[in-house]
Amino acid sequence: MTDTVNMPLSGITVLDLGQVYQGPYAAMLMARAGADVIKVEPVDGEPVRRRSAVSKGAMLPLAMLNSNKRGITLNLKSEEGRHLLLRLVEHADVLLENFAPGVMDGLGVGWEVLHAVNPRLIYASASGFGLSGPDRDALAMDLTIQAVSGAMSVTGFPDGPPLKSGPTFADFLSGTHLYGAVLTALFERTRTGKGRLVEVAMVETVYPALASNLSLLYGTSGAVTTRTGNRHGGLAIAPYNVYPAGDGHVAILCIKEAHWTNLLRAMGREDLADDPRFSTNALRVRNLEATDAVVEAWTTARTRAEIFAAIKQFRIPCAPVRDLEEVMNDPHMHERGMLEWVDHPELGRVVLPTSPLRIHGADRPATAPSPMLGQHNEEVFGGLLGLSSDEIADLRAKGAI
Amino acid sequence: MTDTVNMPLSGITVLDLGQVYQGPYAAMLMARAGADVIKVEPVDGEPVRRRSAVSKGAMLPLAMLNSNKRGITLNLKSEEGRHLLLRLVEHADVLLENFAPGVMDGLGVGWEVLHAVNPRLIYASASGFGLSGPDRDALAMDLTIQAVSGAMSVTGFPDGPPLKSGPTFADFLSGTHLYGAVLTALFERTRTGKGRLVEVAMVETVYPALASNLSLLYGTSGAVTTRTGNRHGGLAIAPYNVYPAGDGHVAILCIKEAHWTNLLRAMGREDLADDPRFSTNALRVRNLEATDAVVEAWTTARTRAEIFAAIKQFRIPCAPVRDLEEVMNDPHMHERGMLEWVDHPELGRVVLPTSPLRIHGADRPATAPSPMLGQHNEEVFGGLLGLSSDEIADLRAKGAI
């Protein structure tokens, strides 16, 4: 996609068969690091593209996660389509997919077949439960993984139902792991010359993130309340909560003892400095309700900006709860180039993320909007594989592309 | 840590100055991929180790995220301590830290100094807001990042307060990105021979995960409800919810039209197949309440197991909401080797995660429990730097290690 060589992944070609969020995000990180990423979609588009039937906005995630890729169509259920994939694999360093386990094998284009075609190919598979084990074939999406992984059981209030996290973090956590797995294999290949099958299971990427919550189970028989509302997941830190403000909410926490003594100063409550209920973190945890009540009495009477201003000078971890409109327009992320206003051919002027991976001194490619369906069919099938216009037209007529 | 060479990162030495979750997790992924990871703690231990004052269980996260590392102590506020760090850097490929921006520079051991000592060193920094921009110096933890990133504003019910996600996903999402950034630089170094400063900002790693939620804002003036309870974050899919069962809850969603028609069969509600309220996903989204009511009426009268059994044969995405006790003992993750029962010298018999990164054909190191504070001081300062026992004793007496 670029001739610049000062990008970490320049010269690396990726076939991105990813769909929805997990696979496409991993491949987007590769594209933003300089790889030539070819997004391979079925002839009627990937699921998020088809969601535009609900509303135009429902396609925004497609634009967010597929910048700087070239787009082709390929019908893997046709003989010609599979043949084209094998030819593309000859030119590729990485093939990435997040179909259910066994789908690619069933189509005759699984790891073993592709590895025989190109022994240097890194084949990356992401799925809900991985390529082995008793739950391998359970269907998985972000929602169901949040359910089975335990994430929902620790989200929400103790007296309320289990709740999903609003961000589809299981998709993105596993997509980011997939990027890491591919780069691990690319690094290893510089030593061995060999490609690898690499694999990430969504449910496994959630487990480490439950570290705080799991600590609550330690030494118990398991019958403990693990939904702690906005309090620390391990109930090991206080204050640690989201407190009501006059115009919304603020998050405040005290990691060090100095944070607490400074918070007392910020609140004008130095009278509590020697209060035996609050003098250490362990004591404040034992007196959770009373500790939170002190903070809440102060925040409730103030705006988010007033609280933040009063607290900032004392270096206490604190943040306003922001809504999406504020976040999308965040001056900080726009100044840093993480977010950009882009004129998208299908969606108009929208905010797109770039890549959270910053490699200082390396160039970053200019943003190219996500491809339209099959936009680069001629370029890729003609340029990379050397097919003629007639051959491409024939493949299109047959429904292979 | 191992002599086996069939590990992707064998021969790579990592100085892990990470603390709490984000940095240590990235370094643990490196250790599990075969790197020699040296965990560098202050003389009184990192924050999670000190949390054991609250309860022994509060130290479980330390055990979870620091397996397969060697542990040393180093007082970076002492001249001798800084000198030792510079000598260690001569032997290192990667140094990783998640202090607030500027802390390492302030100590005289920032990127520029270390890069001069070892031009091949990859210096990895993770922080809340990154190394530049107006919010650079705001203190950040998982809780505050969940607040400012917009994640809380989309978690919870429309009529309830904003909520944090129970898992500390901002820490882990950014920690995983940090792993990806380091591997990107390691890969690039095989071409250039040069080390890089790489950087990850927590708040930036959350933004892409809001893709569904942000789609709700498209084409509006911003005044939209973005907390959707357990429904799809973009309100673009139905059914998509967590439904009450007789003995808990289940998550069910229909991505394809076939899922809906199959769900009707599973529920014995084929009479609704031609109902004009439900015949397409777009229509079901328009009739969300009625759609959910149909599913809920069926789930409420059944157990999780009954629902799962009835649905599984029809290949509809569905999962029970599991609690932590179930997850910790999950036969699937134990069979796959993601989870292991380990006798930990400080905590006894506990379940520890390994690595979600599976590189087929590569060896994985056997689990070594997280080091005790300073456990490998003699081994590292003696072995790697060649210091004598007397010199090490002297450094200890001076409080440098």
Image (spheres, coloured by chain):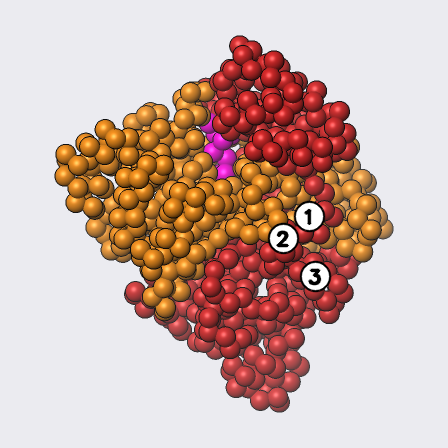
Chain colours: A red, B orange
Residue for badge 3: A341
Q: Mark 2 is on which residue type?
A: Met
Residue for badge 1: A327
Residue for badge 2: A333
Is residue A27 shown to the viewer in this render? no
- Residue range of the region highlighted in magenta in the rendering: A206-215
| Magenta region includes residue A243 | no
SS under mark 1: helix
Question: Is B360 left or right of B259, judged from the image as shown?
Answer: left
Q: Is residue B287 above or below residue A90?
A: above
Of the 4 image quadrants, the one containing the N terminus of chain A is: bottom right
Please report contact status of discs 3 and 1: CB closer than 8 Å, yes or no. no
Please report contact status of discs 1 and 2: CB closer than 8 Å, yes or no. yes
* Sequence-wise first label, 3 or 2: 2
* Sequence-wise first label, 3 or 1: 1
Please report contact status of discs 3 and 2: CB closer than 8 Å, yes or no. no
Q: Position of residue A71 (x, y in %)?
A: 61, 71
Of the 4 image quadrants, the one containing the C terminus of chain A is: bottom right
Subunit ID for the residue under disc 2: A
Subunit ID for the residue under disc 1: A
Instruction: Establish whether labels 1 and 2 are both on one chain.
Output: yes
